[in-house]
């Protein structure tokens, strides 16, 4: 009976997402007949501020935001909450730095994807193809990790078989993403973000009630921290550095990985092409920053507070949140709460799916047809888009059924790998007129090579994560290549730097 009560709210939520996908697909048919790729991949540039903020929040959040992060916070204490607060700046930086510039250029050049922007800026098919391949490879591996995490949530919190849980939520997310496209992803992301917030609040209430009130919870945590310090069994939960476990190099690395360099995540930056006006992006910057801050700090804080009612865990710390939901909450409420981490997983997968599909269909297939002066038939584009999106999702699910151990390793560094490849081409491409094809290719390929080699060898220079030398090497190589390579054409300057282009005449 408890299984049914936990599962019912999730089934209702899934049904709502599917119905929403159908509704959006039916109401987008007219615009798609005219320009399918623009509507399917960026929602016809029609997103308002609230939806833009929510889809960015949902895309940035993932299963690790509800499992891994809070689990580590349970173990290391309030220092990990402090570390997680770095993520507050993500939405503000992405929309504040890239938002207007990318939107203006996107409209001037009729760009639909971030690869379109890169191709226009650097006039380089080689850079565009390399970027598309990086997106396809890293997005697929990230989706596998998300599918695995979502299935593990089902298995631990609801009590159903891993494979059944995997297939159930995989069918839902692949289905509504495939039929609805970007607009369905954006609107269902909004629903998912709301579900995340509600799940976090429900979990907070349960922890405080089970702990006998916030004062008792804090008193218990203080005792645990003192015992850890006296016995050496663990870090001081009240110490901002987690008794030295959170070092300065770790802070620097984390600031880059989940803070500043999130500007280079293509699944997030593509949102800059999808909003309808300046008012929308200004509103999204405020809402997105507040919601990301509340969720990232909130979930990690709950991980620490849960130590008061869950003194030990079996296996990985990833089981902390599922254990709380399964054993410390009313079955119906736990079913509603579990929709939060599932929503985080599904929203990330849907964003990766639609962006990965666009890299294949728009950036490779359609560009190839156009370069050969062949007609692009929108109905055929529509069929190919549906098939590619579905196939990418199914492939990720098949790998997730029996995941090889290396998938977890790849999923961890895929986030940083995307940043190393795209951060400087975006930032320098929009704000440095000398950035060119040679610099972009040399910086992206060289930076990624350094990042992957150091990660594989486990080498940490001065205790820094491999994201730091990767980003630094990418910058140096980008500058060298740009100064050495051929200057940009005047037509590129007119589009990306119109005022400077006039002065240089």
Image (cartoon, rainbow, N blue to C red):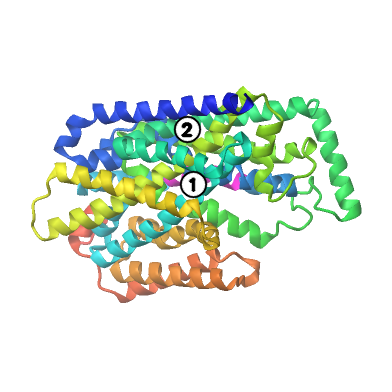
Q: Looking at the magenta stretch, what is its main secondary structure?
A: helix
Which mark is on residue 192?
Answer: 2
Residue that appears at 47% across and 24% down? 12
Q: Earlier in the sequence, mark 1 or mark 2?
A: 1
Residue 200 screen position, x and y as percent: 61, 31
* SS state under label 1: helix
How far apart are the two marked residues, 1 and 2, measured between alpha carbons?
16 Å
Residue 505: mark in rendering:
none
* Horizontal arrangement in the rendering, residue 294 relative to residue 173 (left or right): right
Residue density around tag 2, few if under 14, some if 14–19, many if 20 or more, within 10 Å: many
Q: Is residue 289 visible?
A: no
- Quarter of the image for the C terminus: give it: bottom left
Say above or below: 49 vs 435: above
Residue with the most extreme bottom position: 484
State whether residue 196 is above or below residue 505: above
Q: Is residue 399 left or right of residue 160?
A: left
Q: Do residues under tags 1 and 2 come within 8 Å of each other at their CB atoms? A: no
In this rendered view, identify the residue nearer to me: 408 or 64: 408
Q: Which residue is mark 1?
A: 147
Q: Residue 290: say if magenta.
A: no
Label 2 secondary element:
helix
Residue 86 part of the magenta segment: yes
Q: Position of residue 41 (x, y in %)?
A: 28, 43
Residue 504 makes an appearance in the image: yes
**Residue occupying the point 57% across, 46% down:** 64
Question: Which residue range is magenta in the image?
Answer: 85-94
Question: Which residue is at a point 80% across and 52% down the rendered structure image?
Answer: 235
Question: For the residues carrying marks 1 and 2, which lies nearer the camera in this image?
Answer: 1
Residue 42 sits in quarter: top left
Q: Nearer the viewer, residue 402 or 321?
A: 402
Give the camera-side residue of 179 and 155.
Answer: 155
Relative image position of residue 126 (x, y in whole percent) = 27, 67
């Amino acid at each position: 009976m408890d299984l049914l009560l936990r599962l019912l709210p999730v089934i209702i939520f899934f049904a709502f997402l599917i119905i929403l996908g159908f509704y959006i697909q039916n109401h987008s048919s007219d615009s798609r007949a005219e320009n399918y790729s623009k509507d399917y991949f960026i929602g016809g540039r029609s997103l308002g501020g609230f939806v833009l903020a929510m889809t960015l929040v949902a895309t940035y959040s993932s299963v690790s935001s509800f499992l891994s992060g809070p689990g580590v916070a349970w173990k290391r204490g309030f220092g990990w909450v402090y570390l997680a607060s770095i993520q507050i700046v993500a939405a503000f930086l992405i929309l504040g730095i890239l938002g207007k510039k990318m939107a203006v250029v996107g409209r001037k050049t009729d760009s639909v994807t971030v690869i379109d922007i890169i191709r226009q800026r650097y006039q380089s098919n080689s850079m565009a193809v390399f970027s598309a391949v990086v997106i396809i490879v890293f997005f697929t591996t990230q989706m596998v990790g998300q599918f695995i995490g979502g299935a593990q949530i089902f298995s631990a919190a609801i009590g159903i078989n891993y494979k059944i849980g995997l297939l159930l939520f995989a069918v839902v997310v692949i289905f509504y993403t495939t039929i609805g496209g970007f607009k369905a992803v954006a609107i269902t992301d909004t629903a998912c973000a709301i579900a995340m917030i509600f799940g976090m609040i429900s979990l907070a209430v349960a922890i405080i009630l089970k702990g006998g009130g916030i004062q008792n919870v804090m008193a218990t945590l203080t005792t645990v921290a003192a015992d850890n310090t006296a016995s050496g069994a663990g870090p001081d939960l009240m110490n901002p550095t987690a008794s030295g476990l959170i070092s300065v190099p770790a802070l620097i690395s984390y600031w880059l990985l989940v803070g500043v360099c999130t500007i280079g995540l293509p699944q997030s930056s593509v949102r800059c092409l999808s909003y309808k006006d300046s008012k929308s992006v200004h509103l999204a910057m405020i809402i997105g920053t507040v919601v990301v801050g509340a969720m990232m700090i909130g979930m990690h804080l709950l991980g620490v507070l849960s130590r008061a009612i869950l003194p030990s865990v079996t296996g990985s710390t990833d089981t902390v949140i599922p254990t709380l939901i399964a054993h410390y909450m009313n079955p119906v409420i736990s079913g509603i709460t579990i929709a939060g981490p599932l929503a985080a997983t599904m929203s990330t997968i849907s964003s990766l799916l639609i962006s990965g599909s666009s890299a294949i269909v728009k950036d490779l297939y359609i560009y190839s047809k156009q370069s050969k002066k062949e007609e692009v038939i929108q109905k055929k584009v529509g069929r190919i888009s549906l098939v590619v999106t579905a196939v990418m999702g199914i492939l990720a699910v098949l790998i997730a059924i029996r995941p090889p151990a290396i998938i977890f390793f790849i999923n961890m560094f895929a986030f940083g790998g995307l940043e190393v490849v795209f951060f400087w081409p975006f930032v320098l491409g929009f704000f440095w007129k000398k950035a060119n094809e040679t610099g972009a290719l040399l910086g992206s390929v060289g930076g990624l090579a350094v990042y992957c080699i150091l990660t594989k060898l486990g080498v940490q220079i001065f205790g820094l994560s491999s994201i730091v030398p990767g980003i630094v090497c990418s910058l140096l190589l980008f500058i060298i290549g740009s100064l050495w390579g051929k200057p940009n054409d005047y037509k590129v300057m007119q589009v990306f730097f119109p005022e400077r282009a006039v002065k240089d005449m």
